[in-house]
Image (spheres, grey):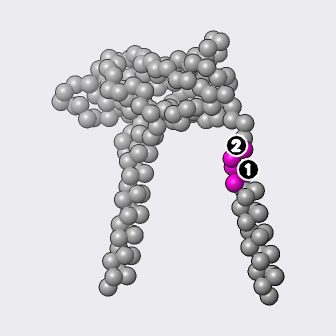
Amino acid sequence: MKNDLRISAVILSWMLAAAALVVLSGHGGGTAQVVDQPIGGLRATVWTEPEAPRVGEAFHVTVALYQATAADHDTPVTEAQVVVRLIGPEGQEVAREAALDPGPPPTFAADVVLPAPGEWQGEVHVTAAEGQGTVRFAVHVEAASRGAGWWLWAAVGGAVVVALGWWWQQRRAR
């Protein structure tokens, strides 16, 4: 009986974790850059991930569009052209058209790779039957990762030394 309850609790925990992942993946997760900002007859929310992007790594931008009227406040918009544009500190520009992810909830998403560190200005330009407009946000891009830190290599080396010591002790005990 106790084992059955434990198994049920484990299964329920996994199901709740999976449900949380589905909810988070619905809007791409990450950091909210723009929340419920009006664009013509729409409202836009923009998330980015990772929170601290690095040069040469994928930077994911997710956009949710909803009707702006009170009666249709929770009605998502799926018929729109969404362009993500990032402008770097030296005037570099990276732009991608966001593709519709049917959700739920439906969102538009684009991945960009930023070529330089520093303060970048993000823009999301939306064109839809309800109107058009642009929302803006700032993002700080870190320098490229230099690989695993010294602490990781020290931990791996320590684990190898411990494993070899254990193996040697087992061998001598025979």
Residue 150, magenta (yes or no): yes
Q: Position of residue 101 (x, y in %)?
A: 45, 40
Q: Position of residue 97 (x, y in %)?
A: 53, 27
Query: Taking 21 as reference, is 105 above or below it?
Result: above
Give the residue at x 43% y 51%. 21
Residue 172, magenta (yes or no): no
Residue 78 or residue 125, whichever sits in front: 125
User: What stretch of residues is rendered in magenta?
Assistant: 149-155
> Dot 1: within a 10 Å radius of its alpha carbon, few (fewer than 14), some, or many (20 or more) residues?
few
Query: Taking 77 as reference, is 166 above or below it?
Result: below
Q: Is residue 80 visible?
A: no
Locate the N terminus and report the quarter of the image it occupies. Answer: bottom left
Q: Report how far apart the C-alphas of labels 2 and 1 lie in the structure.
A: 7 Å
Query: Taking 11 as reference, is 116 above or below it?
Result: above
Write down the quadrant of residue 69 in the picture.
Answer: top left
Classify residue 57 as left or right of residue 167. Answer: left
Classify residue 122 as left or right of residue 4. Answer: right
